[in-house]
Amino acid sequence: MTADEEPGPPGLSIAGARATITLRRPAHRNRLHREDLHALQSHLRRIAADDALRVLVLTGQGPAFCAGFHLGQLGQPDAAGTDPQLFEHTVDALAALALPTVARLNGGIHGGATDLALACDFRIGVAGLTLRMPAARLGLHYYPGGLQRAVARLGLQAAKRLFLLAEPVDDAELLRIGYLDALVGPAQLDTAVDALCASLQAGAPLALRGMKASLDELAQGGADPARLRERVARCADSADLREGLAALAERRTPQFLGR
């Protein structure tokens, strides 16, 4: 077992322009403790500060993606800080990343992991996975940001099904409602994730990051037309656009620099 595979807080690895965060508590279906959330926030800050990165993959060890927050820590003081919305703020930080993000769903999705995966831009799931959001059966009112994200990305009726029924949802239904972008067999999971990451890394970073932000703002109903036009203008005057047009004319692969 390597250091990156040892159980504990999430690990971060970087290979070229791709970052990977791996949840590392397989014996507990990768449930998230408070220390894990602080580690995730630290990794996300590092990724956000590195303009050389083009894509982030979030995944888990073992047969499950994530079991959500460690319910045994509900109501306990936060030893590493005083943030009462630590989970919500961590997921919001993932959603706010400028670069594209991919959830490599290697297994079941439970509780808060529903929103953790939904905060990524794309989700590729392994055949046989199920999702369950049990908040209603526990007496919990889920945090507003997660509810808003579910409605914006899945639609009201799908969100009601997930949160109000609190029943397991199988892989085919998750694909049908748009929670999953792709569903593949275990042997094809890494190939599918690699292909999606390659497609994202082939795009111009300035355009990708700008359009991701604009699309998210439009979906949330909070888009500022002036801010959207500013992003359009920035790309129109970018070295990336000039490179893209030159590469098209010369029939070669563009070399984008993100400016």
Image: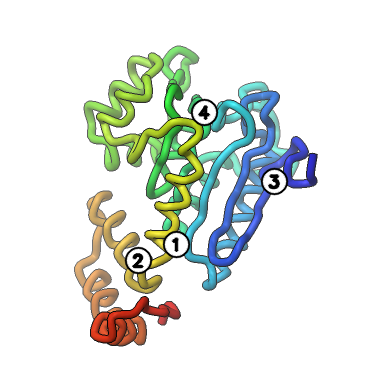
Q: Quadrant of the N terminus?
A: top right
> Which-is-in-front pick, marks 4 and 3?
4
Identify residue type, mark 1: Leu
Q: In the rendering, at what x and y percent does residue 154 appear?
A: 27, 36
**130 or 202, nearer to the observer:** 202
CB-based contact (under 8 Å), mark 1 and mark 2? yes
Earlier sequence position, callout 4 versus callout 3 = 3
- Between 202 and 80, the one nearer to me in the picture: 202
Q: Distance of mark 1 from mark 2, alpha carbons? A: 7 Å
Determine whether, in the image, residue 130 is placed left or right of residue 27. left
Evaluate whether residue 234 shows in this view: no
Q: Residue at x 66, y 47 (%)?
A: 38
Q: Disc 2 and disc 4: Cα gap in Å?
A: 28 Å
From the image, state whether disc 1 or disc 3 is nearer to you. 1
Quadrant of the image occupied by residue 42: bottom right
Residue that carries the numbered disc 1 in the rendered image: 99
